Amino acid sequence: MTTVYGLRKLICAMLLLCALCCVFSSCFNSGEGDTQTTSPAEDFSEYDYAAGRVGLEVSIEKRVSPSYHCNFAGQQPYFDRQGMTMFPMVHFEELFEGNVSYEINDNTVTITKNVLGVLTVVSVTADSYILLRDGKEIKMNTVPVQQDGTIYIPLEFVGDALSYNILWNDYRKMIEFFQYNSVYVYVWNENKNSSLDGIRYSYIISGDYTLDMSAIKENTTSDFNEVRELLEKLPSKAWVYTTTLYKIKGYTVPYRIISEIMEVGRDGRVRRLSHSYTRRCLDEIPSIIKNLDDSFNKWYSQELFALDEDSLNVSKGHVYRLSYFPSFTDPFVVRIEIKKDGTADVFYKVGDGIAAYGYSNGIKKLEKLKLGKKETQQFLELLDKTDYWRLPDEIDRLGCDGHFIVIEGVKDKIYHIVNRWVPEKTDPVSIIVEYFFNLVGQELPE
């Protein structure tokens, strides 16, 4: 995450993530003029995104403010047979900024990063698959090479070990190089009722991003000024990665707390520090939705868990559920349980929290209704009229903002799910949606 994302753009971010996944999973290609290397047997799938890049002209983009491109004169970075970016040390100081230094002893490169007194030392040796980080061995899938009077290092491995972020931008056909994450800041709330006196901060200087609460809590403080003083000591182009750790029900951290962190480092109109922000859920979320893309499965399951809903695909009853996940308002679910006597119970729940924020804080409205035999039969006839059980699970229609509709049904142990982004009026799903909305007195979104 290289910029501060607007939370209401979650759906766009999900689409971008899907597109990136397609790029990252591309197959390895070979090209002329590559360094002859042999990959060891270990699985390096984490770096598969580097595949498919051989033969492209390389630019390095440094995402600082203002952003600019760096096209190196003379010895150029290139891609080797493993798809790794081989970067010439002769251009080291043009790319690596901040408190970073290096030395070359024979054919070994040693790079030292100093962030507020915390040192990270990384070394690689020409023709060796071993990278040393603070004395710990890390196996690479390629080797540094010594040629043309300089040593070329595998940028992805060395950069990752130094907490830089190196990504391939397939659209722009370039490597994107982001200034190092100097400090990881964590924020959470220890009070279930979300009162502000439960807000806690922690930080990790340099090192690795982690969700290990024992490691995070080593620097716990309730005083934001301690965090502010720390960040103000960082180099001018340092990167701060802020994460909210939350639970689904309660324990809320207001976004203004995050904004306060991201204001640190602003000097007039010039931002001294770059920030990135994300949320991580600490709850174990059951797989309530299982039949869609993993990103939808996780998101919908998270919301339904917050609304105390269970998985329907293991239900033995006769049940239908509409779930509404909007970008800017509260989510809700309407569940219709068909009874043996021909009537039905209706359960209507409204979540406390915007769905596009990635979580809800529980239920803020709960109602139970009843349908008589005639009303229940009319509903079932509506499903037959729209041919619900034959509707495609998903269609090729997605967009930003708006809302998602999920309609599930289970009958005679047969389960069916329909997922739509802003159903079109020509889609039979829209007729079913209108029925559910009218049933609970909700206005159809435009």
Image: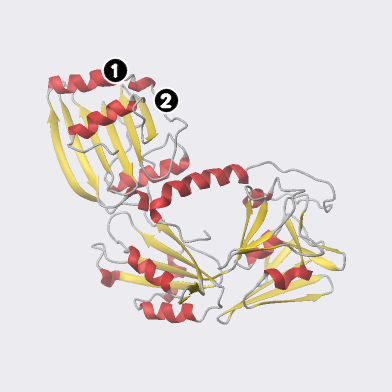
For this orientation, the residue located farthest to the front is 269
For the C terminus, the quadrant is top left
In this image, 35 relative to 264: left or right? right
Q: Earlier in the sequence, mark 1 or mark 2?
A: 1
**Which amino acid, by three-letter code, is at mark 1?**
Asp
Is residue 135 something that shows in the picture? yes
**139 lies above or below 197:** above
For this orientation, the residue located farthest to the right is 148
* The quarter of the displayed image where residue 191 is located: bottom left
* The quarter of the displayed image where residue 286 is located: top left
Q: Could you say whether the residue bearing mark 1 is in a helix, strand or loop?
A: helix
State the CA–CA distance, disc 1 to disc 2.
15 Å
In this view, the residue in front, 344 or 278, is 278
Residue at 13% in and 34% down: 369
For residue 403, which numbered disc appears in the image? none
Residue at 40% in and 63% down: 244
Sort mark 2 into few (<14), some (14-19) or many (20+) by Cα contacts within 10 Å: few
In this view, the residue in front, 266 or 350, is 266
**Which amino acid, by three-letter code, is at mark 2?**
Pro
Sort mark 1 into few (<14), some (14-19) or many (20+) by Cα contacts within 10 Å: few
For residue 384, which numbered disc appears in the image? 1
**440 lies above or below 47:** above
**244 lies above or below 401:** below
How far from the left and from the top, in percent, is residue 310? Answer: 30, 39
Q: Are marks 1 and 2 in contact (CB under 8 Å)?
A: no
Is residue 317 something that shows in the picture? no
How far from the left and from the top, in percent, is residue 42? Answer: 70, 51
**396 lies above or below 258:** above
Residue at 22% in and 38% down: 443
In this image, 391 relative to 231: left or right? left
Q: Could you say whether the residue bearing mark 2 is in a helix, strand or loop?
A: loop
Query: Would you name the residue on which mark 2 appears?
Result: 392
